[in-house]
Image (tube, rainbow, N blue to C red):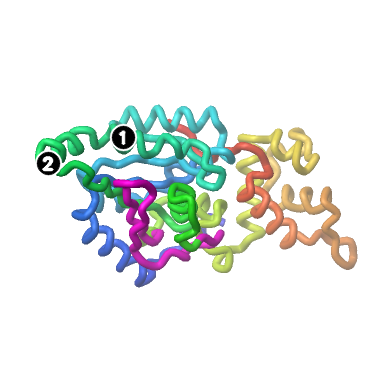
Amino acid sequence: MMSEIQSIQWFPGHMTRTKRKIQDSLKLVEAVAEIIDARIPVSSRNPDLDQLVQSKPRIILLNKCDMADPVQTAKWIAYFQGKGAYALAVDCKSGKGLQGFMPLVRSVLADQIEAWKTKGMVGRSIRVMVVGIPNVGKSSFINKMSKSSKVKVEDRPGVTRGNQWVTIAKGFDLLDTPGVLWPKFEDPAVGEKLAFTGAVKDQIMDTEQLAGRLLELLAARYPHSLQERYKIQASDTEGKPGYELLEAVGRKRGMLISGGEIDTERAAMMVLDEFRGGKLGKITLETVK
């Protein structure tokens, strides 16, 4: 599994253009909203953004919080705040937590807004750039904030292709940008976790190895999830490799093919789909160190 993840080194041309667009557009906005996946708060952050965004105020939105471990999400929010950032737990599909976004931005930009008033620029629009890796929820966030479907949303990476402005309230505009990954994964575990959540296309992955690795992590950190969803006892998962866990899942779900063999490919897709859909419970795969 690790060797496969290490081989995922790509930097499509449209991502190079996206970086350039982000750099060119920064002068048009007052702040940046970075959307990350609350289940993998480290791996879903593009390290290039620190250099790209530089001194612009940044609000970190921990999306998909409804699928993440709430105890861990609270720890991550405290962590980011301790680093001097602004953080908010949200779920862009249901809208949970999004009511706090505009007040937070106005609070962060209070000095800037006051300066505008002093110069007679009353009513000037606040402009915020929305950034994040593919499939992290940027389009869902903008659609929910604008109460429309102006931005194309699909549950696959790479749908948003160009920068576009969206007005979400009077005097408040968002600049959407395509999702951008980085040239290579220095840590193979980062690529692995991105693959779990669907930020990396399944077509380039061995889904059985991927699902097996996910089951290993769940057996170690959230054994009750496997017990509740697949009726696999914690005592039956201890020390077992991922492929055996995958076979156990397939056996419990009756996924058999000719000769009584277990259809592990079908079981793998089911495990990945159910994890991505939040059906395995509230899970966070990265903890504050």
Residue annotated with mark 1:
85
Q: Residue at x 71, y 33 (%)?
A: 224
Image-quadrant location for residue 238:
top right
Image-quadrant location for residue 284:
top right
Asked whether residue 101 is drawn in magenta, I would say no
- Residue 135 image position (x, y, % from top left): 49, 56
The amino acid at mark 1 is Ala
Residue in front for this viewpoint, 266 or 165: 165
Q: Quadrant of the N terminus?
A: bottom right
- Judge the density around disc 1: few (<14), some (14-19), many (≥20) Cα neighbours within 10 Å: some
- Residue 286 image position (x, y, % from top left): 50, 38
Q: Residue at x 57, y 34 (%)?
A: 69
- Residue 138 image position (x, y, % from top left): 44, 53
Asked whether residue 176 is drawn in magenta, I would say yes
What label sits on residue 120 in the rendered view? Answer: 2
Residue range in magenta is: 153-179
Q: Quadrant of the C terminus?
A: top left
Q: Secondary structure at mark 1?
A: loop
Which residue appears farthest toward the bottom when viewing the image? 13
